[in-house]
Amino acid sequence: MSRTEAALLVLEDGRTFRGEAYGARGETFGEAVFCTAMTGYQETLTDPSYHRQVVVMTAPHIGNTGVNDEDGESSRIWVSGYVVRDPSPIPSSWRSRRSLPAELEAQGVVGISGIDTRALTRHLRDRGAMRVGVSSVESDPRALLERVLAAPAMAGADLAAEVSTPEPYVVPAVGERRFTVAALDLGIKAMTPRLMAQRGIEVHVVPSSTTTDQLLAMDVDGLFVSNGPGDPATADSARDLVRGALDRRQPVFGICFGNQVLGRALGFDTYKLKFGHRGTNQPVQDRTTGRVEISAHNHGFAVDAPTDRVSTTPFGRVEVSHVCLNDGVVEGLVCRDVPAFSVQYHPEAAAGPHDSAYLFDRFAELMAAPTAGAR
């Protein structure tokens, strides 16, 4: 857009930034979080896990490659607001179909540009993720702050049903079908069932409200529990569904929110991180092999499981399989007596890196193992 209009960003602790309107004009609220990815902004915007969050991009130049029709992780943008420093005025990619600001405007996503995102990120690292308002219709920080403080917090938010598919759908296996999996959609990204399909897995993506009886009627080989937004302490129905699968010794694989759901099903608590992990450059160590993987993250909660010993749970022995090398946060769980494992990060990583794609092979191996229970 040729004209510039003032925009205002106010955090719940009163910190204020002034910049220019970017994307749709209006006002929005959510949890302010920062993403350290240097690429893949279209995948970030369309990730359902960012529902009700205002995303601050730490990379200074955003919008260079425009928006295409192939790279979205869902059919729409999910972020509540978008914060960038230097938006690209002209997209430069043969795949681009629209500019990023035009796409944001078309989907009603309010943003702000021209602010010091480095200073904002440092503030969030020091003070923690918090509620925020972005407005191009309000110039008084005090008035906007009042509305920020009235907005709901992320802790205690039950959001999976708001992003889940309303009806089941199937992603067919590529080539010969080896297994059939039910993928519980708590905010699933499009690349996830595609990568399973490439391994001969027929994926039945089902709503977050799916019951144990419905899952049993599907007669699947395994249960996959997806990523998603909100507080895992609210996901009681998903937790109970996983517990039923564990009772039947049905293979279970969870990622991100699914890792937290598995953790709760095993009896662990979850807690909110100070500012979370979001980006495509997070170092995680596989404690079994010692290998370090650079991984894609998007989470503000974590599983509270001990990393210094094997835990005894109602489903047998459980170990922490992966840890974040930045802060020691639990990044994966593996069950030793039932066929289940999970990771806190995103092995599908559509924008990269792909260090962790082997985990989908591990899921297939788990379903092929003779110790897997009857369906």
Image (cartoon, rainbow, N blue to C red):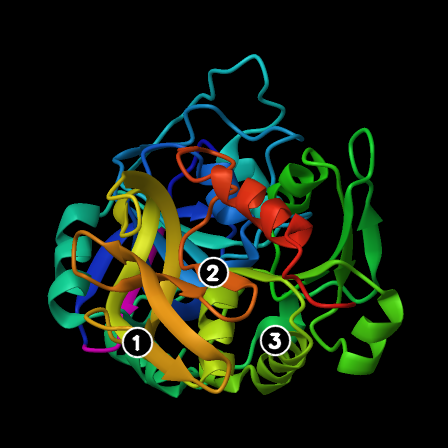
Place of residue 96 in the rendered image (x, y in percent of width and height, measured from the top left): 58, 22
Q: Mark 1 points at which residue?
A: 305
Question: On the rendered structure, is 314 left or right of 166?
Answer: left
Asked if marks 3 and 1 touch (Cβ < 8 Å), the reply is no
Place of residue 310 in the rendered image (x, y in percent of width and height, measured from the top left): 30, 73
User: Counting other residues with Cα less than 10 Å from the Cα at mark 1, is it few (<14), some (14-19), or many (20 or more)?
Assistant: many
Question: On the rendered structure, is 220 left or right of 157?
Answer: right
- Residue 217: quadrant of the picture: bottom right
Which one is nearer the viewer's eye here, 167 or 337? 337
| Identity, as a three-letter code, of the amino acid under mark 1 | Ala
Question: On the rendered structure, is 3 left or right of 192?
Answer: left
| Identity, as a three-letter code, of the amino acid under mark 2 | Ser
Question: On the rendered structure, is 256 left or right of 185?
Answer: left
Q: Name the residue under label 3.
A: 246
Q: Is residue 51 something one can see in this rendering?
A: no
Residues rendered magenta in the picture: 5-13
Q: Which of marks 3 and 2 is nearer the N terminus?
A: 3
Q: What is the spatial separation of the Cα atoms under label 3 and label 1, in whole angstroms?
A: 18 Å
Q: Which of marks 3 and 2 is in front?
A: 3
Which one is nearer the viewer's eye here, 73 or 270? 270
Which one is nearer the viewer's eye here, 305 or 117? 305
Q: What is the spatial separation of the Cα atoms under label 1 and label 2, in whole angstroms?
A: 13 Å
Q: In this view, does 110 lie above or below 295?
A: below
Q: In this view, does 196 lie above or below 223?
A: above
Secondary structure of the residue carrying numbered label 1: loop
Secondary structure of the residue carrying numbered label 3: helix
Q: Mark 2 points at which residue?
A: 342
Q: Main secondary structure of the magenta part?
A: strand
Q: Earlier in the sequence, mark 1 or mark 2?
A: 1
Q: Earlier in the sequence, mark 3 or mark 1?
A: 3
Q: Is residue 3 above or below residue 206?
A: above
